[in-house]
Image (cartoon, rainbow, N blue to C red):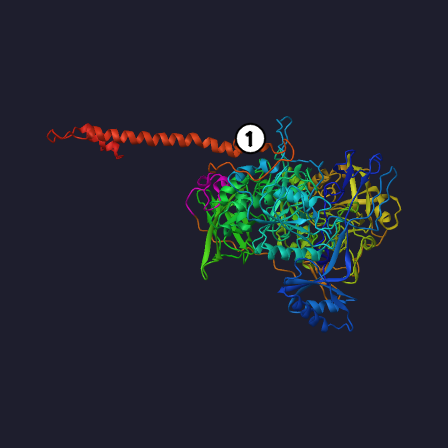
Amino acid sequence: MLLLPVWVSMLFGLLVGFLPLVGMEPMGAVKFDSDHTLNPKPLLSSSESNCSQLTLKVEFSSKVVEHEYIIGFTGYFSAKARSLYISSALRNAADEGLEWHIVPRENPASDFPSDFELVHICQASSSSLRTLEDHPYIKRVTKQRKVFPPESAAPCNNTQVTQKWQSWQSSRPFRRTSLSLGSGFWHATGRHSSRRLLRAIPRHVAQILQADVLWQMGHTGSGVKVAVFDTGLSEKHPHFKNVKERTNWTNEKTLDDGLGHGTFVAGVIASMRECQGFAPDSELHIFRVFTNNQVSYTSWFLDAFNYAILKKIDVLNLSIGGPDFMDHPFVDKVWELTANRVIMVSAIGNDGPLYGTLNNPADQMDVIGVGGIDFEDNIARFSSRGMTTWELPWGYGRVKPDIVTYGSGVRGSGMKEGCRSLSGTSVASPVVAGAVTLLASTVLNRELVNPASMKQALIASARRLPGVNMFEQGHGKLDLIRAYQILNSYRPQASLSPSYIDLTECPYMWPYCSQPIYYGGMPTIVNVTILNGMGVTGRIVDKPIWQPYLPQNGDHIDVAVSHSPVLWPWSGYLAVSISVAKKAASWEGIAQGHVIVTVASPAENDVGSELTSTVKLPIKVKIVPTPPRSKRVLWDQYHNLRYPPGYFPRDNLRMKNDPLDWNGDHIHTNFRDMYQHLRSMGYFVEVLGAPLTCFDASQYGTLLMVDSEEEYFPEEITKLRRDIDNGLSLIIFSDWYNTSVMRKVKFYDENTRQWWMPDTGGANVPALNDLISVWGMAFSDGLYEGDFTLADHDMYYASGCSIARFPEDGIVIAKKLKDQGLEVLKQETAVVEGVPILGLYQTPSDGGGRIVLYGDSNCIDDSHRQKDCFWLLDALLQYTSYSMTPSSLSHSHSRVAAPTGNERLLPQRLEGNHLYRYSKVLEAHLGDPKPRPLPACPHLSWAKPQPVNETAPSNLWKHQKLLSVDLDKVALPHAKVYRPQVRPLSPGESGAWDIPGGIMPGRYNQEVGQTIPVFAFLGAMVVLSFFVVQLTKVKSKPKRRKPRVKRPTYLQQQQTMTTGKNPTV
């Protein structure tokens, strides 16, 4: 059986210039104004829409190509060998008379060995597919998929639009999309001031970033091969002079760009006139992988990637992305590309400002992930934010994006001629790709340029933006000139990202700086990326060394370090866990130390020898006394599941264009606002990434379970009951679970010949009911939505469930809501009175804790929150932590008698669900999943400290530099005036050439100018010292004709002073 990510893999869409394509903000629409420019605006409801304008909501659909399978091999083989392997495997299949043939692929890669084959198999059974996968040379079998746009769009009207619940299609989760936005999309977030001087916006992004400084030195991208994977390029476009090769990987017989997106991206990189690109003399390789109908296939991309490796491409721009980091064929191929020294630059995504929205492949360690800013250096609203979610729930995400640059209103080449403006991280990506191409051409020894060394130069030279955290800006804004200086003094080495850990530095180190650490708390985990510029593979020598600074109380913290066993390709991870020593349980202050890591890589030219590089990771933390139990909240991360790999639907069923739950459900991703609110209220929030058996309940006042999709071990249920009897309180925010609705949003997978359904609802209500059944509580399978007022606060219930059973002495709040389940199933509308949505209960045991149930989590989830209920969370925490019952709830007119559970049946698990495939709790057992053995709790091996009695650096950011790099030694020379052969097509389009000296004004020139008086002063002092020495020698020289006499004392003293020795006193 193939998992969902396999058939979801490699689905690509595209947003292009003047056509209404996808790749815009979620729930966005394309509205054509009177001047026919593309202006993305929020999709209006029917009551808000204006029918004088045509509103189009455009989505991509995807489907399985019937009977076509992609057979992946373990290596590269000739066409004859691939055919023999497939024949051998299918000969052993149980299906008699199985008909199959290899689908011919007519593209430039067909004459070369390949690592996959496209096969047409009629009536393939699951056993025959398993037989294929069992062959020793076959790695995997996946279904060929096609992505395409819809054929029609409907105009708006004033009548209420009935939702078509039968079709659950999405442009976002089931494919990789282009990450560009329309020209009118100009959003910014971050710093704000009521009045500020607005800077005039220059016209060309290459000159804004001072590419012309390098042009005048003779560097224009010459000799660098850059690939653009997009929609093609016209043969005689006037902006390009060095298109080395155009290849077509589609089924259309053309190489031209019929959409304009590929032309724009290529222009930002290599245009030679009008809207100049960064590297006009680079070798441009155009890979046309989308048709004019915006259709692409998985096999097209795999062939194109293989061809890029064969052509020894240096830089590859990929302005696409998707959430599926478990798309194994795609991820594996990206690793293979970078292992072959291809520097891949990719857009980080257009799903901001929500956190945890990074797109793949930009979120991979070996890829340069690019975010977007506007021309006022504000993070663009659309730019996706970190952290990565690969590592959840056990670990913590990595810092991404790597770097940010201009992505709003950037000018690039039009489809046939002229210039146009676009916005999106799809635009920021070619800005960095062009800069990388230009930088690579400045290095004489091209062997030094690889994916790691280029990323090291970019992040070490980046200009940090003030007031912006690392999950928004990465290492900062692209600085082309400083990157040039670093690359031209670079020696192969290892480096770290981030290069230091300072849990006191806000806001850059958010969220680490938002909460101090204390004894007894969950260890703080920092996921550091190791970049290895010495070679594609490497290793960490021995164990990392922990050295606390004794003068800075470094012995008050404990550190544990784990790392990648092998650094490949060009990178690996270094997970640092920080905890407070027992002796600092009541201490408050700053503690510092550092971790020393030595990386070794095989030397390329000297067999048997190794290159080594030692890096130091400074650590600085703030320690406070352990807070009281009532102030400590524990967030259950272990029981949250998300896409990928399984089909876990959104909590709000109205969000049909974004149906998958893929943001991680972490307090630092889509629950960031809730976390910030709790911190502002004085609570300390910790994360549990292990089973409930792995924490000391006596340390915490409240356990917070939100939107849980995972099952529970029997041992967890037993321990939680004991913990609550001993004083721990529990708050559960649930979501919908209805098997009929889950069947309604199913889809048919022709690969496995079965219907795929959600593995849970918005939450796993049957599992939650098992957890709380001992107290006589349960959630129902009802599905409700609607607006209401509670304690004078406006609230919105978004696809939540109701409480089916509750103790009679508890407090239950009910409201009038719409039956959304009826609407989904029968397209009928009904209002239900007295739906129990909130319950509060004090357990009867002496000193026992309290339990709160609420049927909807959308009001604290940033993903699609319409009205927050943080005030309610405050009231519930007052109840669970201090046993203070909110009077607004206990005396509410909405209070009703506790439901007994007789009104309707409790929800049952969906028959035939595949949750066991992705669950950490369940395993398959003769068709009936059962719990796995309870895993052991995580055990950290604390590093043995090697204290150092020296003072720690006070500013860790400025203290850290890339090893073996001295920017002062790579000053820009006074080169002769040189510019690429650029001929403006219209007056005023290339105004940079009119600036005296050809150098654009900027911070770089100001810095160079500030060094001139220093050198002049030093030179004058050297000359003056020379004359003083000579004059002293003449005065002290004796006359020849006079007899030798003893020199006066004052002359001896003067001579002693001239020679630099101190006179004796």
**Tag 1: Cα neighbours inside 10 Å, few (<14), some, or many (≥20)?**
few
As drawn, 213 above or below 610: above
* Residue at 55% over, 33% down: 1000
- Per the rendered image, the range of residues in magenta is 948-971
The residue that disc 1 covers is 995
**Position of residue 915 in the picture relative to residue 547 (left or right):** right
Q: Determine the residue located farthest toward the left in the rendered image.
A: 1043
Residue 92 seen in the figure: no
As drawn, 553 above or below 989: below
Q: Position of residue 972 (x, y in %)?
A: 48, 38
Q: Position of residue 566 (x, y in %)?
A: 54, 58
Q: Quadrant of residue 922?
A: bottom right
Q: Position of residue 793 (x, y in %)?
A: 76, 35
Residue 196 seen in the figure: yes
Quadrant that contains the C terminus: top left
Q: Nearer the viewer, residue 58 or 730?
A: 58
Q: Nearer the viewer, residue 784 or 273?
A: 273
Q: Nearer the viewer, residue 28 or 1032?
A: 1032
Would residue 962 be counted in the magenta stretch? Answer: yes
Quadrant that contains the N terminus: bottom right
As drawn, 568 above or below 263: below
Would residue 887 be counted in the magenta stretch? Answer: no
Q: Position of residue 964 (x, y in %)?
A: 45, 46
Q: Nearer the viewer, residue 565 or 245?
A: 245
State the SS at label 1: loop
Q: Does the magenta stretch mainly form a helix, a strand or a loop?
A: loop
Instruction: Indicate the amino acid at tag 1.
Output: Ile
